[in-house]
Amino acid sequence: MKYIVALCRIIVGVLFIISGFIKLNDPVGFSFKLEEYFSPGVLDLDFLMPYALGISIFVVILEVLLGVMLLIGFRIKITLWSLLLMIVFFTFLTFYSAYFNKVTDCGCFGDAIKLTPWESFTKDVILLVLIVILFLGVKHIKSPLGNRSQRLLVGLSLLISAIFAYYVLNHLPAIDFRPYKIGANIEEGMSVPENAPVAIFDYSWKFNVDGEEKVVVTNGDYPSVEGEFIGVETKEIQKGYQPPIHDFTIERDGEDFSASLLQEPKLVMVIAYDLAKSHYNVFSDIKEVTDKAIKNGYKVIGMSASGPDYTQKMIKEYKLSFDFYFTDETTLKTIVRSNPGVLVLEHGTINQKVHYNDLEDLEFK
């Protein structure tokens, strides 16, 4: 039992630290995921929406700390109860997502590792079992460190986590796991390889034949059955290849200009997923850097999910020298964790991406 408990302790502690650190690298992204859970039609906790970022930071730092506390054996009973309550909560969320198909990605490992809802639920059930084993073998959980050393390590972990969270919130994630990272080509990210697997479906055709229901399964072709057609049900038996970027458009008046704009040798994108929530005080700086870009031969565009009333108001109020195009809000949130943020592209390849706090780092050659 002692060795089983030791193994479970290492697995649970390391997984909590890794999971927490990945989300701590991108707390804004995790807050967007929490907003999905809080939204009407999912958990209907829309009153928590304004606090999503704060909850995100608290949860991910707690996740890291609990992993550290378990590994060093600090306040083990409090640690185990906290781990149990957290994993029960996560298990409920992942089961709810999987069973009701509400949130297709739990965000357990951020954008680094994508898990299906059922995979996430299975992972949480396994962790729940491991934590229960730790409860049963709690007497075997010892620490070679003294109480003072334990407190020092926990305090240091909290300090490092807080500093790291502060940094990524005021700049951008230290590690970018998304398909819009620097060096990525957006057009290539949207392409489908020649030999990519295609989606395969089974079609169950229902007919009324002489008063009895008859079901014929095909791979898509309408069956030759003499009888009254009732309906058809489809079931996906093999998922097709989905490119990393599959929802990117740059629209104006219903027309998509992404193909032509991604061919621009010098393109600057000012991205503000929701102008109503943007930091208005930085648009004077946006005006300054975009005017500089235009003087250096760059084409500058704005990209937002806000309507023309907001975009025209921003252009007029800050005397912006560029127009806004429409792009899906979720896509814009994925591209850059800053509202607003700026990207510099060359023929569709992202060469620079900055938070609004780092506009001075932009280089226009």
Image (cartoon, helix red, strand yellow):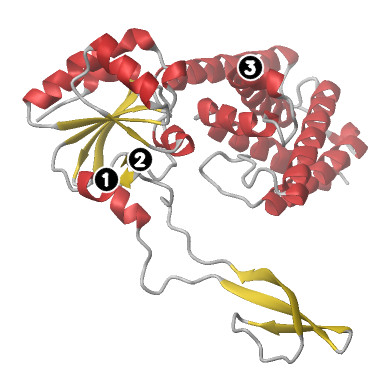
Q: Is residue 243 above or below residue 101?
A: below
Q: Which mark is residue 257?
A: 1
User: Mark 1 or mark 2: which comes first in sequence?
Assistant: 2
Question: Which residue is labeled 3 in the image?
Answer: 51
Residue kind at label 2, given as amino acid type: Lys
Q: Give me the residue at 61% from left, 73% from top.
A: 201
SS category of the residue bearing label 1: loop
Task: Tell me what residue is drawn at x 24 percent, y 27 percent.
Answer: 323
The count of marks equals: 3
Q: Amino acid at mark 1?
A: Phe
Task: Specify the quadrant of the image occupied by residue 167.
Answer: top left
Badge 2 marks a residue whose secondary structure is: loop
Instruction: Where is residue 87? Give x, y as percent.
Output: 78, 36
Residue that appears at 72% across and 39% down: 12
Name the residue carrying label 2.
181
Residue drawn at point x = 38 percent, y = 21 percent: 309
Relative to 88, residue 291 above or below: above
Tell which residue pokes out farthest to the top in this image: 281
3D distance between C-alphas at marks 3 and 2: 27 Å
Mark toward the start of the polypeptide (3 vs 1): 3
Give the SS element for disc 3: helix
Q: Find residue 138 and name its label.
A: none
Q: CA distance from mark 1 to mark 2?
A: 21 Å
Say whether residue 150 is visible: yes
Judge left or right: residue 70 versus residue 115: right
Q: Position of residue 68 (x, y in %)?
A: 67, 27
Q: Is residue 284 visible to us here? A: no
* Viewer-proximal residue among 158 and 106: 106
